[in-house]
Image (cartoon, rainbow, N blue to C red):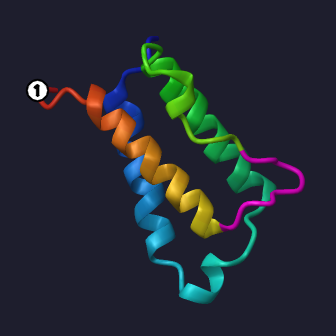
Amino acid sequence: MAINANQIFEQVKGAIAALEKLPAKEREVKPSSTFARNYNNLLALAKEAMPEVDERRWPPTVEEMVCDARYTEIHAFLEQLRVILQEGYDYGL
């Protein structure tokens, strides 16, 4: 089944909303490998849904076993994904 920007856009919005509910102190914590793996999966799906996007625009993947990024940084990466996916969002669906 082909992935489209609409499907991933909604997932990214959900991840952003969840991160925004974290207390400020928790946003500075490094995420679990499960969270990092989920983020990397969303990024891969977004790239699959929008192959025409220049590779330089995509945010980076994060290390799954020893994640150096904090939740605040991943929040920023997800916002970048949201903006890119919005370009391919079909509001008619």
The magenta stretch spans residue 17: no
Q: Main secondary structure of the magenta part?
A: loop
| Camera-side residue of 93 and 87 | 87
**Can you tell which quarter of the image residue 55 is in?**
top right
Percent from the top left, x then y, of residue 40? 66, 40
Percent from the top left, x then y, of residue 54? 49, 21
Q: Magenta segment, which residues?
A: 62-70
Amino acid of disc 1:
Gly
Residue at 65% across / 45% down in the picture? Answer: 38
Say left or right for 29 vs 11: right
Residue at 75% across / 53% down in the picture? Answer: 34
**Helix, strand or loop at disc 1?**
loop
Residue at 31% across / 31% down in the picture? Answer: 6
Say left or right for 19 vs 50: right
What residue sits right under mark 1 in the picture? 92
Percent from the top left, x then y, of residue 12? 44, 47
